[in-house]
Every structure is written in structure tokens, then in C-alpha cells.
Amino acid sequence: MKPMTEKDEKRELEFVMMCLAIVCGCGVLTEMLRTILSVVDWMEGTMDAWMLVTRGVNLAVALVCGVTVIVIMREVKHRRVFTHKNANLVTVIGCVTVFGGIAQNVINNLVYENITKAYSDIMFMIIGVFILFIACLFKIGIRMKEEQDLTV
């Protein structure tokens, strides 16, 4: 197996960043479209206002996560990957995702007596906790890198 050159590493990084940008952009656009369609349904009377609020929560989570990922991508582009700033930004993504899931579930459980009418999306909370776990690993890696830099 031949070692990667610096040019290959740069191409790989650019490819990964482009894929991440596409995924984040598609997620935000999807949530925007879902919210617009929900507004139309609400205006026609086929959806109640609380379901519209939960769609708004989804959109807010997607927007905050999308903007945060863009900031991380800018840092990575300048070769600042394992920094405290990026670790904190990953933590923000995890917290926003968890709080978005909590907000949706609180709205659904307080508003609807018949829980079958509401959808309870616990996946937001599970994914958010997983992202927070990754952020903790990221911080541990930064600390190990700093210790290694001091010993050399």
C-alpha cells in the first residue's frame, strides 16, 4: 500500500467536505420544504397549529446545525481540525439536536391526549446524545494531542 501524498490528502479532504456540505444543504432544504407544505396544510385546515410548531422546531434545528457545520468546514479548510472551537461546535450540534427532540416530545405529550395522533420522534434525542458522545471523544483527542505536543 503506497502512502498518500499531500495532494491526495487535500483531494480527500475536499471531497469529504463537499459531501458534508451537500448532506447539510439537502437536510435544511428538506426541512424548509416540509415546513412550507405544513403551512399550506395548516391553512387548509388539515393540520393543527401544534404540528406546525413541531415542524418549526425541526427547521430551527436543521438551520442551527447547518450553520454550525459550515463554520466547522471553514476551520477544517484552514487546517484547524482538532481545536477546542471545533469541539465546542460539535457539542452545540449535539445539544441543539437533543433539545429539539425534547421540545417536540414535550409539545406532543402536552398537547395530544391521544398519543396516536402525534408522532413522537425520539430519534432526535438518540442522535443528539450520540453526537455529544463524539464531541467528548473529540475533546479527549485534543487533550491527548496537546499532551503529546508537550512531551516532544
Image: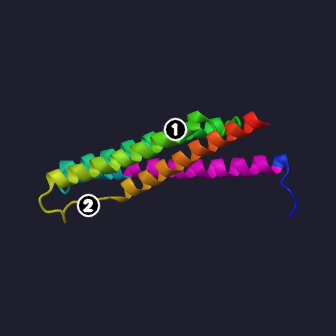
Which segment did they paint magenta? 8-33
**Quarter residue 116 falls in:** bottom left
Relative to 130, say whether 80 is above or below.
above
Element type where label 2 sits in the image = loop
Relative to 24, say whether 116 is above or below.
below
User: Is residue 42 in sight in this rendering?
Assistant: no
Q: Quadrant of the C terminus?
A: top right
Crowding near the residue tagged with mark 1, few <14, some 14–19, many ≥20 C-alpha atoms within 10 Å:
some
What percent of the width, then of the height, locates residue 34?
35, 53
Residue 108 covered by magenta stretch: no
Residue 16 covered by magenta stretch: yes
Q: Residue at x 15, y 52 (%)?
A: 111
Q: Residue at x 16, y 51 (%)?
A: 110
The answer to which of 118 and 95 lies nearer the viewer is 95
What percent of the width, then of the height, locates residue 146?
68, 36
Instruction: Name the kind of residue labelled 1 in the image.
Output: Leu
Position of 93 with respect to 116 (left or right) is: right
Which of pointers 2 and 1 lies earlier in the amino acid sequence? Answer: 1
Q: Residue furthest right?
A: 2
Circle 2 residue: 119
Q: Residue at x 33, y 51 (%)?
A: 101
What percent of the width, then of the height, locates residue 50?
20, 49
Circle 1 residue: 89
Element type where label 1 sits in the image = helix
* Contact, mark 2 vs mark 1 (Cβ under 8 Å): no
Crowding near the residue tagged with mark 2, few <14, some 14–19, many ≥20 C-alpha atoms within 10 Å:
some
Q: Which disc is residue 131 wearing?
A: none
The answer to which of 98 and 52 lies nearer the viewer is 98
Instruction: Name the kind of residue labelled 2 in the image.
Output: Tyr
